[in-house]
Image (tube, rainbow, N blue to C red):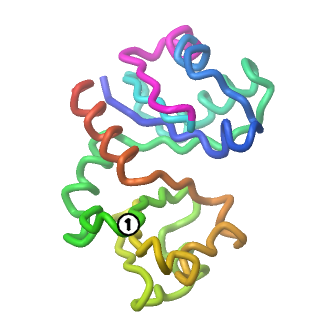
């Protein structure tokens, strides 16, 4: 069994794309996934499966959500071990300054991390820090000057639909839940 994280993009945001996490958990269990745990209303599901084809898992999860909730939601599947490895490689500055926002940007395949970085452009070093490990981009920016950072403007770009963002607290909790599942 392999532990995965399903990151649902754009659920329960501003009253749109409503997905009840308890129902989602039941759906995952009925589909045959095990050790299913949801975290927060923002669409984070930790689960185990014997399936090793991530593309197939992605299709299965998206079909499950569409059939149960009537929503076409983009799902990103991250291997639990990949998240833990990325966190082992995180830059020393990430999630250390209490006066900054610390996020992880997960790149949704087939888009590459390099494509996202080229599209957004170079980080403005006076306002933000950006580093990456494979499909995980670490980003920190001081709260006071957050709106001046280049990466805060990713929301309005064509790449926005090719990523999903989680804050440091969520990412660290997901890692903790993955470790419990292993």
Q: Residue at x 62, y 45 (%)?
A: 9
Quadrant of the image occupied by residue 26: top right
**Residue 31: within the magenta?**
yes
Question: x, y (%) of residue 130?
Answer: 39, 76
Location of residue 38 in the rendering, given as x and y in whole percent from the top left corner: 46, 25
The residue carrying mark 1 is 138
Image location (x, y in percent) of residue 29? 50, 11
Q: Is residue 135 visible?
A: no
- Residue 44 seen from this side: yes
Q: Is residue 111 above or below residue 40?
A: below
For the N terminus, the quadrant is top left
| In the foreground, 121 or 142 | 142
Disc 1 residue crowd, few under 14, some 14–19, many 20+, Cα 10 Å: many
Q: Is residue 140 above or below residue 135?
A: below
The residue lying at 75 percent from left, 20 percent from top is 67
In this orientation, which residue lies closer to the viewer: 137 or 147? 147
Q: Residue at x 40, y 44 (%)?
A: 170
Q: Residue at the spot x=77%, y=38% of the render?
A: 16
Question: In the rendered structure, does residue 102 fall within the stretch colored magenta?
Answer: no
Instruction: Name the foreground residue: 169 vs 6.
Output: 169
Span colored in magenta: 27-41
Q: Quadrant of the C terminus?
A: top left
């Amino acid at each position: 069994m392999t532990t995965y994280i399903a990151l649902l993009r754009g659920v329960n945001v501003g009253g749109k794309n409503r997905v009840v996490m308890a129902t989602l958990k039941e759906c995952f269990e009925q589909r045959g996934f095990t050790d299913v745990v949801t975290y927060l209303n923002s669409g984070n599901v930790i689960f185990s499966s014997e399936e090793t084809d991530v593309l197939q898992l992605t299709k299965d999860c998206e079909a499950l959500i569409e059939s149960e909730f009537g929503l076409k939601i983009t799902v990103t599947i991250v291997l639990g071990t990949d998240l833990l490895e990325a966190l082992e490689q995180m830059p020393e500055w990430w999630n250390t300054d209490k006066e900054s926002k610390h996020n992880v940007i997960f790149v949704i395949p087939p888009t590459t991390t390099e494509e996202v970085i080229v599209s957004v452009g170079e980080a403005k070093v006076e306002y933000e820090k950006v580093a990456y490990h494979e499909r995980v981009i670490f980003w920190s920016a001081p709260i006071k000057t957050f709106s001046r950072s280049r990466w805060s403007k990713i929301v309005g770009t064509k790449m926005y639909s090719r990523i999903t963002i989680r804050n440091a607290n969520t990412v660290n909790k997901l890692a903790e839940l993955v470790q419990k599942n292993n």
